[in-house]
Amino acid sequence: MKDIERLIRPNIAALCPYSTARDEYQGPLGIFLDANESPYPNGFNRYPDPHQKALKAKLSKIKGLPVENIFLGNGSDEAIDLVFRVFCRPGVDNAVAMAPSYGMYAVAAATNDIEVRSVQLGAEFDLPAEALLQACDDNTRVMFLCSPNNPTGNAYDSRELLSLADRFDGILVVDEAYADFSSKGSIRSEVLGRSNVIVLQTLSKAYGMAGLRLGMAFACKRIIELMSMVKYPYNINQAALDKVSELLDSPVEAQIREIIKERRALAEYMTGLPYVKKVYPSDANFLLVKVDDADALYDHLIGDGIIVRNRNRVAGCSGCLRITIGLGSENDKLRATLATYRA
Ligand SMILES: *Cc1c(COP(=O)(O)O)cnc(C)c1O
């Protein structure tokens, strides 16, 4: 286990976290006159559990990791922001990230006044391990990798990711937002034997709860403690706690299988279109497709009410559209519209 204490911002290491009314009294239920809440019940008049114990217990069973290794955030976007706030001194430290990748790493870094050193992926979007390590200096605290990657769709081998974690003297964040769709699976169980790895997952994609905002970070106990100390005390609201818990009782495996089946069919169809140069292999719920004229095809799809993501102006993705896999009927409509396009 690597020593990560030296990586923690000194002000965070010294932080005395806010103690909520719910922290100070944890006895049996009684008459609660301690938090200045309204006494009139409407289902939401009480503050939610700042430690989200019940939901974490449920996710602990699903994910196969102890509660002490789970952080819950208002989307994984909150966890990304917290990583910068816990480990990076504004204006001093830096982070390394692969590119093209998820845009939030750069935005969260910029709002925290942290420099991001971007390293372009290889030819087939392979992991530039040596270049990522070479981009680091004494002030590099964090490295962001995304697998399966957004927007390229490819997933990396767990051995590649873990070897980077072992060679990197900082915190390695592996964003697995799309891992449920991937044949490569997840490396989340590896956080038990490693102090410097944070695995991010979310309920926004395969679990169908983007509107509820529930992201997860898996890491060693110390990192979970640090992130929990810095977060807003009531970062997950009661409505989200209730609804997420309810929806977790409905299995999503069949939907995931269906999306993977649709992904395969759509990839095959698009490969046969004359104006499609390349359909990149995908381990996610979207396809990255390179075409003759991405802007023109984007406009053609919009003309038929189909909205995709134009990645034409993203470095490394020129000529590319990112297309989310929809319902079978939606994908049929997409194919019909693609068939009427002439580049
Ligand atoms: C969609 C996505 C997320 C999810 O963010 P939430 O805030 O949990 O909705 C995280 N990382 C990547 C790479 C994504 O594409």
Image (cartoon, helix red, strand yellow):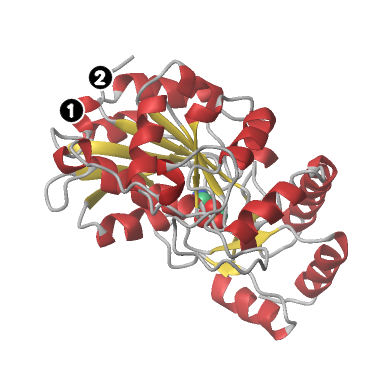
Quarter of the N terminus within the rendering:
top left
Helix, strand or loop status at disc 2: loop
Q: Residues within 10 Å of mark 2 (few under 14, many from 20)?
A: few
Quarter of the C terminus within the rendering:
bottom right
**Which residue lies at the image location 65% right of the left edge and 41% below the top edge?**
283
Q: Could you give the CA–CA distance between mark 2 and mark 1, rounded to whole angstroms?
A: 7 Å
Q: Is residue 262 above or below residue 46?
A: above
Q: Position of residue 208 (x, y in %)?
A: 71, 54
Which residue is label 1 attached to?
A: 6
Q: Position of residue 246 (x, y in %)?
A: 76, 50
Q: Please, what is the three-letter code of the amino acid marked with disc 2? A: Asp
Q: Residues within 10 Å of mark 1 (few under 14, many from 20)?
A: few
**Which residue lies at the image location 53% right of the left edge and 54% below the top edge?**
32
Q: Position of residue 106 (x, y in %)?
A: 33, 56
> Looking at the image, do the residues carrying marks 2 and 1 touch, with CB atoms under 8 Å apart?
yes
Q: Is residue 109 above or below residue 339?
A: above
**Which residue lies at the image location 48% right of the left edge and 19% below the top edge?**
192
Q: Is residue 14 above or below residue 152?
A: above
Q: Nearer the viewer, residue 115 or 204?
A: 204
Q: Nearer the viewer, residue 86 or 238?
A: 238
Which residue is label 2 attached to?
A: 3
In the displayed image of the protein, which residue is found farthest to the front? 31
Q: Is residue 285 left or right of residue 264?
A: left
Q: Is residue 42 above or below residue 105?
A: below
**Which residue lies at the image location 41% right of the left edge and 34% below the top edge?**
224
Q: Is residue 105 left or right of residue 243?
A: left
Helix, strand or loop status at disc 1: helix
Q: Is mark 1 within 8 Å of ligand 1?
A: no
Q: Position of residue 240 (x, y in %)?
A: 62, 57
Tell me, yes or no, if residue 288 can be seen here: no
